[in-house]
Amino acid sequence: MDMLELRNLRVFAEGKEIVKGVSLCVKQGEVHVIMGQNGSGKSTLLNALAGHPKYRTEGVAKFEGKDLLAMKPHERARAGLFLAFQSPNEVPGVALSSFLRRAHVARQGKEISVAAFEKMMDEKMKLLGMEKSFASRGVNEGFSGGEKKRSEMLQLAVLQPRLALLDELDSGLDVDALSKIASAVEKIREKDSSLVIVTHYARILRNLKPDAVHVMREGRIIASGSGELARKLEEKGYEWINSSV
């Protein structure tokens, strides 16, 4: 089954075309990585798929066969699409556990008791090697870069989306922290769910095995391949791919 199908997707912001006709197919259970330099349109693509109101879209985007572009942002999230932000906002005064419980209810469409939810949270946090006190902190309030990423991983574990869009998962992380986050992704993701990961660097692929790697430049996918493509980019740099296409 195709989890995500894009055909000639174009994304505009303030009258400017940023994503210029991207076509892509992500099947159920697959991991796709989108690489590219700053300004290539990677993050814009993910935000547009999540329904950010800043962007206007044209073309076709289907999520498990449904017209994604016809769905409102909350409908996309409820259907199982999850976006992990590069720089998530702080929500002072709202405990992470409370935030996640309401998000879980919205995602599942039914209530869950506080006791049952806390038990589930404890299990997920133990799996991720997180202190229980983490859940009582304000959402991203005073979090370090690594803590923000761990918070996103906890959200991913609790909400169990069908399709997770992970924007700059490696941003601001050292090698050890990145290894832990990548391992966490492998632990918590469901086998029949799919991932689309945006990154500048191939280093995250040392811990995650992609089914496909795509390179974006100036709003277009200019090359696609296996993990070997990412390794070549790491070795030779983006000038190599720019000159070879």
Image (tube, helix red, strand yellow):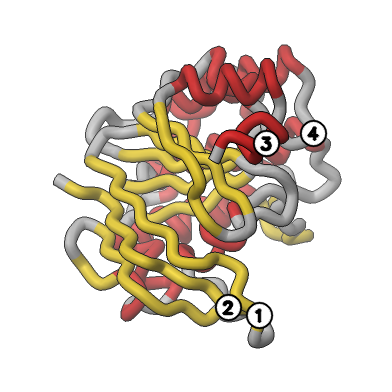
Give the residue drawn at x 53%, y 27%.
125
- Residue 94 or 192: which is nearer the viewer? 192
**Type of the residue with mark 4:** Gly
Alpha carbons under labels 4 and 1: distance apart: 29 Å
**Type of the residue with mark 3:** His
Give the residue drawn at x 23%, y 40%.
28
Rendered image: mark on residue 16:
1
- Residue 195 or 233: which is nearer the viewer? 233
Q: Position of residue 55 (x, y in %)?
A: 57, 77
Q: Quadrant of residue 106?
A: bottom left
Quadrant occupied by the N terminus: top left
Q: Quadrant of residue 73?
A: bottom left
- State which tag comes first along the sequence, 2 or 4: 2
Q: Position of residue 117 (x, y in %)?
A: 41, 43
Alpha carbons under labels 2 and 4: distance apart: 28 Å
The image shows residue 66, relative to residue 198, as above or below, that is below
Q: Secondary structure at mark 1?
A: strand
Mark 2 near mark 1, Cβ–Cβ under 8 Å?
yes
**Would residue 134 be visible to someone looking at this image?**
no
Lateral position of residue 121 relative to residue 79, left or right: right
Residue matched to label 3: 200
Mark 3 near mark 4, Cβ–Cβ under 8 Å?
no
Alpha carbons under labels 3 and 4: distance apart: 12 Å
- State which tag comes first along the sequence, 1 or 3: 1
Rendered image: mark on residue 172:
4
Q: Position of residue 168 (x, y in %)?
A: 65, 41
Lateral position of residue 95 relative to residue 103, left or right: right
- State which tag comes first along the sequence, 3 or 4: 4
- State which tag comes first along the sequence, 4 or 1: 1
Which of the two discs, 4 and 1, sits closer to the camera? 1
Residue matched to label 2: 12
